[in-house]
Amino acid sequence: MMLDNVVDTTMIFSITGHMDPELDFMREAAPIFRRACSCPDSPSKQIHLQALFLQPTDSLRDYAVMDIFSSVITFRPMLFQYDTTFDPELGSSVLNFSDDAGMQWARGLPYQVALVFARINTLRASPAWDLGLFNELETTLQEFVPVPTVSSEPNLVIGRTIVQECWRQAAYIYLYMGLCGAGADDPRVIQALSNFLAVVNSVKPGRVPDSFIIMCFVIASQILSYLNINSSCFPCSQTGVAARNEVDRGNIRYRMLGVEEFGYRGGCALAALEQLWRMADTESRPAVWIDLKWMS
């Protein structure tokens, strides 16, 4: 119950755009989270993230997700060094969850993709990392298959599939920019952005998928700050790229503000992105991941 209250309070600060109090509450709640996740026989054992994501306690999953993604945005190390190994047997068990259980449907974030974000965070905090680890992460994203939805509503099935694909493309961007230090002009980054926009623009705005991919919009929007001032990064057959990206910015503005329960948080994130876009336009340079640091 205490962790539930802490998570709820932390989310309020997140929604209102106040990162410092959010991080303070997370630090204070860290011992509670640690005890709740600990095995009685091995209290110092690392928390196995995949197993945590597949269990039904919302507050535990939410705390871990906030820890992972506040690290993505603020560049601070995660509060815990999680065990991010993948257990194939646990992987198959997600198919046995009902539509309302597990982080997959509660938050829209595929747990396989969340593991990738967590592993990237860990590698970024390391003084050096092996190329084989990068290849493993890239392969994980390449082989990711959206978890199927069983529903009589075709729009819900499509929406959930789109949410998962958006997260996959956002993870590609974080892998290349956040881990490898690539700029927004890197062909791999541009391809991931193009895929993301194609998926998002294939459906009308709505709670599904938009309320589940606010963070994806934040990640993708950083690249738009560069594409707006340098259309040469796209193949020449795609004419009018600068104008198109103004349209893309407009679409992202509309979608980030369009979901009622996320309107304020979307507005706070969008205000920061608008400043990032202006900065990149003024400096006429490719955006890099460090540009997001001042947003925290």
Image: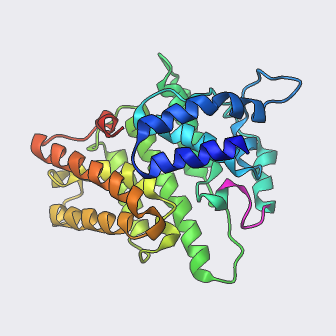
Q: Position of residue 32 (x, y in %)?
A: 70, 32
* 189 displayed left or right of 214: left
Q: Count all numbered tags in the image, as a single digit.
A: 0
* 256 displayed left or right of 211: left
Residue closest to the eye, 234 or 10? 10
* Predominant secondary structure, magenta span: loop
Q: Position of residue 87 (x, y in %)?
A: 76, 41
Q: Residue 100 magenta-drawn?
A: yes
Where 292 sits versus 41, above or below? below
| Quarter the N terminus occupies | top right
Q: Residue 70 magenta-drawn?
A: no
**Could you tell me which residue is drawn at 84 percent across and 30 percent down?**
39
Q: Which residues are magenta?
A: 97-103
| Quarter the C terminus occupies | top left
Whether residue 104 is visible to the viewer of this picture, yes or no, is yes
Q: Quadrant of residue 27 in the image? A: top right
* 50 displayed left or right of 138: right
Whether residue 237 is visible to the viewer of this picture, yes or no, is no
Where 143 sits versus 296, above or below? below
